[in-house]
Image (spheres, rainbow, N blue to C red):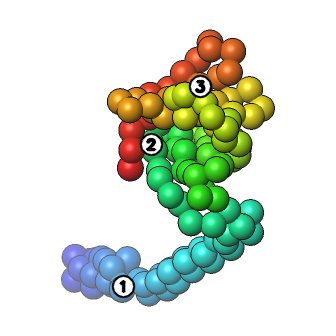
Amino acid sequence: MTRLLLPVCAAALLAACQAQTPEPALAPEPAPAPAAPDPERANDGDVVAGYACEGGNTVELVREGRVARASLSDGRTIRLGEMAGSSPRTWSDVGLSFSVGDDFAELSQTNGEYSLTCTPL
C-alpha cells in the first residue's frame, strides 16, 4: 500500500505545481494629448515681466505692460487693466489689483482685506 501511496502523492504534487501561464503585460497608458494653446493667451502677446505670488498665484505683464494677467490658484485667469499715471504702478479690475513699487509687488483685493506678496520670476 505504501508503494501505491507514494506515486499518488507525487502525481498530486506535480499537478499542483504545474507552471501557470503568465498574465499578459498591461499595455502602457497612452500619454495625454498636449493641451491646446489658449487662444486668449496667444492674443495677449509677449510676456514683459512675470511674478510669483503667495498661494500658487502668478501675474504676468502682457500687451507691452498695459495688462496684468493674473493666473489664480483656483484656475481662473483675470486680466487687469493698467491704471494710467498711478503711483505705485497699478493694474486693477473685478475687485482685484496688482501693484509694483521699487521694492515690492503685491496682488490684493481692491477692498484691502486680503493681499499676497509677489516676487519677480
Quarter placement of the N terminus? bottom left
Q: Which mark is residue 18?
A: 1
Q: Amino acid at mark 3?
A: Ser
Report if residue 38 is visible in the image. Answer: no
Which residue: 65% across, 49% down?
Answer: 67
Q: Amino acid at mark 1?
A: Gln
Labels 2 and 1 touching (C-beta < 8 A): no
Along the line of sight, which residue is nearer the eye, 9 or 113?
Answer: 113
Residue 104 visible: yes
Locate residue 89 relative to residue 120 in the image: left or right: right
Q: Are marks 2 and 3 in contact (CB under 8 Å)?
A: no
Residue 39 — which label? none
Vertical comparison of 47 with 76: above or below: below
* SS class, disc 2: strand
Which residue is tagged 2?
Answer: 52
Question: Of callouts 1 and 3, which one flags the residue occurring earlier in the amino acid sequence?
Answer: 1
64 with respect to 78 (left or right): left
Q: Report the front residue among 108 and 20.
A: 108
The disc labelled 2 sits on which kind of residue?
Ala
Secondary-structure class at tag 3: strand
Q: Position of residue 99 (x, y in %)?
A: 54, 31
Which mark sits nearer the N-terminus, 2 or 1?
A: 1
Crowding near the residue tagged with mark 1, few <14, some 14–19, many ≥20 C-alpha atoms within 10 Å: few
Q: Which mark is residue 108?
A: 3
Residue plotted at (52% across, 29% down): 88
Identity of the residue drawn at 68% across and 21% down: 110
Query: What separation in Å lies between label 2 and label 1 (alpha carbons)?
Result: 62 Å
